């Protein structure tokens, strides 16, 4: 699942470190960086980020960080998750009162940011979707996840191979769907993603995966072999025999 974030009111050093650390979390994408109340509010109202990192030390042009949060309440049904950044814990009461999800102290550290983002993701866990919507111009096709056998890259498009010998083409890259699909979909090759629930056999000698139905055997490449081995280990149990 993908998320977005924004950075508001932080000094250049905090911005630099935060941007660097967030590269360790590719599921989080930056929407904007701002240092002014009015600008930040307008950006949030246009496209609310999932997480907002907000410096509450009132520097870099922000009048009042907590007033910024309050100004959003009349306009949004659901506010972003705010994370306070400060050089001290003196404003802890205000942070709690304004429903911030976390409090990061300067200088920022990667381990503390990791805990913060893991907490956010845990709080925002959703049930995996059972359908996927593919758009082609004004045409929307809805596909049941369990109907998908595998995906194959075709230049900048992706072919979905489904049960009953059906195929649907989507005008997005395979990488796009790799980040979008549930965990039971596994990238095994630069050109293939398979639905692991449809696997019936893994042949490590020939580097092939066999799926249910009449679909062809799907190759997995050397670079993705560790993921295939991990998949096998999740389901393989060594038989034990009584002596």
Image (cartoon, rainbow, N blue to C red):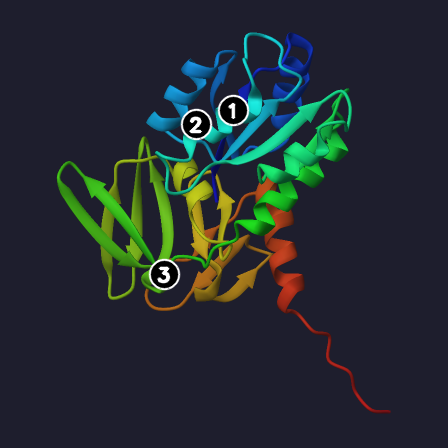
Q: Residue furthest bottom?
A: 243
Give the farthest residue toward the right: 243
Q: Name the residue under label 1.
A: 67
* Vertical placement of residue 211 versus 159, above or below: below
Query: Could you say which is closer to the camera, residue 220 or residue 99?
Result: 99
Q: Quadrant of residue 47?
A: top left
Dot 1 or dot 3, earlier in sequence:
1
Image coordinates for residue 90, horizontal then vertical, percent = 76, 27
Query: Looking at the image, do the residues carrying marks 2 and 3 touch, with CB atoms under 8 Å apart?
Result: no
Q: Do the numbered discs 1 and 2 sit on residues whose CB atoms are within 8 Å?
A: yes
User: Does dot 3 land on a helix, a strand or a loop?
Assistant: loop
Label 2: few (<14), some or many (≥20) within 10 Å?
few
The answer to whether 141 appears left or right of 172 in the picture is left
- Give the percent coordinates (x, y) of residue 121: 57, 46
- Kindly report the distance in space between the C-alpha atoms of the residues bearing marks 1 and 3: 40 Å
Report x, y in % for residue 153: 36, 39
Image height check: is 133 above or below 163?
Answer: above
How far apart marks 2 and 3 lie (CA) works out to 37 Å
The one nearer the camera, 62 or 7, is 62
| Residue drawn at point x = 36 percent, y = 27 percent | 45
Secondary element under disc 2, as helix, strand or loop, is: helix
Q: Residue at x 64, y 55 (%)?
A: 229
The residue nearer to you, when weighing 176 against 15, is 15
Instruction: Work out whether mark 2 precedes mark 3 in sequence or the reverse, and give the earlier one.
Output: 2
Q: In this view, does 234 lie above or below 43?
A: below
Reading the image, the residue beneath label 3 is 130
Q: Residue at x 59, y 24 (%)?
A: 54
Foreground: disc 1 or disc 3: 1
Helix, strand, or loop for circle 1? helix
Select label 2 or label 3 by which is in front: 2
Q: Mark on residue 71? A: 2
């Amino acid at each position: 699942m993908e998320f977005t974030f924004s950075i508001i009111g932080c000094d250049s050093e905090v911005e630099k470190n935060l941007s660097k650390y967030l590269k360790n979390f590719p599921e989080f994408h930056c929407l904007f960086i701002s240092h002014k109340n009015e600008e930040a509010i307008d950006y949030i109202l246009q496209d609310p980020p999932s997480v907002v990192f907000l410096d509450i030390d009132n520097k870099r042009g922000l009048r009042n960080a907590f007033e910024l949060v309050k100004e959003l309440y009349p306009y949004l049904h659901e506010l972003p998750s705010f994370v306070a950044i400060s050089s001290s814990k003196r404003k802890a009461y205000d942070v709690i009162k304004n429903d911030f999800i976390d409090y990061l102290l300067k200088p920022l550290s990667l381990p503390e940011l990791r805990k913060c983002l893991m907490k956010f993701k845990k709080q925002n866990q959703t049930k995996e979707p059972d359908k996927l919507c593919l758009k082609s111009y004004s045409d929307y096709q809805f596909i049941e996840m369990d109907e998908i056998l595998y995906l194959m890259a075709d230049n900048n498009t992706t072919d979905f191979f489904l049960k009953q010998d059906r195929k649907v083409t989507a005008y997005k890259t395979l990488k796009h769907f790799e980040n979008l699909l549930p965990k039971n979909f596994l990238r095994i090759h630069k050109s293939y993603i398979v639905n692991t629930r449809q696997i019936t056999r893994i042949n490590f000698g020939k580097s092939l995966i066999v799926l249910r139905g009449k679909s062809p055997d799907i190759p997995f490449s050397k670079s993705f072999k560790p993921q295939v081995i991990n998949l096998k280990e999740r389901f393989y149990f060594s038989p034990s025999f009584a002596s």
